[in-house]
Amino acid sequence: MTKSDKYYLDLIKKIEKIRQKNNGNWMDILKIAFKHSPQETAKVMRNIYSDDNQVSKLVKKLTN
Protein backbone atom coordinates (compact mmCIF):
# COMPACT_ATOMS: atom_id res chain seq x y z
CA MET A 1 0.00 0.00 0.00
CA THR A 2 1.40 3.33 -1.00
CA LYS A 3 1.40 6.43 1.12
CA SER A 4 -1.34 7.97 -1.04
CA ASP A 5 -3.47 4.78 -0.75
CA LYS A 6 -3.27 5.01 3.03
CA TYR A 7 -4.12 8.71 2.91
CA TYR A 8 -7.28 8.08 0.87
CA LEU A 9 -8.34 5.09 2.96
CA ASP A 10 -7.91 7.15 6.14
CA LEU A 11 -10.07 9.91 4.68
CA ILE A 12 -12.73 7.40 3.64
CA LYS A 13 -12.77 5.92 7.16
CA LYS A 14 -13.24 9.41 8.63
CA ILE A 15 -16.08 10.14 6.22
CA GLU A 16 -17.69 6.80 7.06
CA LYS A 17 -17.63 7.54 10.81
CA ILE A 18 -19.15 10.98 10.29
CA ARG A 19 -21.86 9.59 7.99
CA GLN A 20 -22.75 6.90 10.52
CA LYS A 21 -23.20 9.54 13.20
CA ASN A 22 -25.14 11.79 10.82
CA ASN A 23 -27.46 8.93 9.83
CA GLY A 24 -28.30 8.55 13.51
CA ASN A 25 -29.08 12.26 13.67
CA TRP A 26 -31.38 11.94 10.64
CA MET A 27 -33.24 9.08 12.31
CA ASP A 28 -33.67 11.16 15.47
CA ILE A 29 -35.12 14.04 13.45
CA LEU A 30 -37.45 11.64 11.65
CA LYS A 31 -38.74 10.19 14.95
CA ILE A 32 -39.40 13.66 16.34
CA ALA A 33 -41.14 14.77 13.14
CA PHE A 34 -43.45 11.74 13.02
CA LYS A 35 -44.23 12.17 16.71
CA HIS A 36 -45.29 15.80 16.33
CA SER A 37 -46.77 15.88 12.82
CA PRO A 38 -47.11 12.42 11.27
CA GLN A 39 -49.20 13.40 8.23
CA GLU A 40 -47.00 16.34 7.29
CA THR A 41 -43.86 14.27 7.84
CA ALA A 42 -45.23 11.47 5.65
CA LYS A 43 -45.80 13.96 2.82
CA VAL A 44 -42.23 15.21 3.05
CA MET A 45 -40.88 11.65 3.20
CA ARG A 46 -42.91 10.77 0.10
CA ASN A 47 -41.30 13.71 -1.73
CA ILE A 48 -37.82 12.69 -0.59
CA TYR A 49 -38.46 9.12 -1.74
CA SER A 50 -39.67 10.33 -5.13
CA ASP A 51 -36.66 12.61 -5.60
CA ASP A 52 -34.28 9.82 -4.54
CA ASN A 53 -35.85 7.54 -7.13
CA GLN A 54 -35.32 10.16 -9.82
CA VAL A 55 -31.67 10.51 -8.83
CA SER A 56 -31.26 6.72 -8.84
CA LYS A 57 -32.69 6.50 -12.37
CA LEU A 58 -30.28 9.17 -13.59
CA VAL A 59 -27.32 7.46 -11.94
CA LYS A 60 -28.38 4.18 -13.50
CA LYS A 61 -28.24 5.85 -16.93
CA LEU A 62 -24.73 7.05 -16.17
CA THR A 63 -23.53 3.61 -15.15
CA ASN A 64 -25.03 1.56 -17.98
Image (cartoon, rainbow, N blue to C red):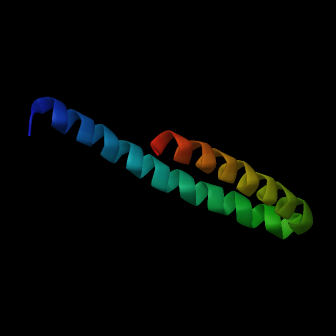
Left/right of residue 33 with respect to residue 1 in the rendered view:
right
User: Does residue 35 appear left or right of residue 58 in this picture?
Assistant: right
Is residue 30 shown above or below 64? below
Q: Nearer the viewer, residue 15 or 61?
A: 61
Coordinates of residue 3 in the picture (x, y in percent) = 12, 31
Tell me the residue at 63%/45% (across/down): 55
Residue 43, given in percent of the width and then of the height, sits at: 86, 59
When asked about the image quadrant of residue 5, the answer is: top left
Q: Residue at x 73, y 66 (%)?
A: 31
Q: Residue 7 is drawn in which quadrant?
A: top left
Task: In the rendered view, tell whether residue 18 sits above or below residue 45.
Answer: above
Query: Dividing the picture into quarters, in which one does residue 12 lie?
Result: top left
Question: What's the residue at 26%, 41% (across, down)?
Answer: 10
Query: From the image, which quarter does the N terminus lie in?
Result: top left
Q: Position of residue 27 (x, y in %)?
A: 64, 62
For this view, does 35 lie left or right of residue 20?
right
Identify the residue at the far top of this view: 4
Q: Position of residue 53 (x, y in %)?
A: 67, 53
Q: Residue most toward the left?
A: 1
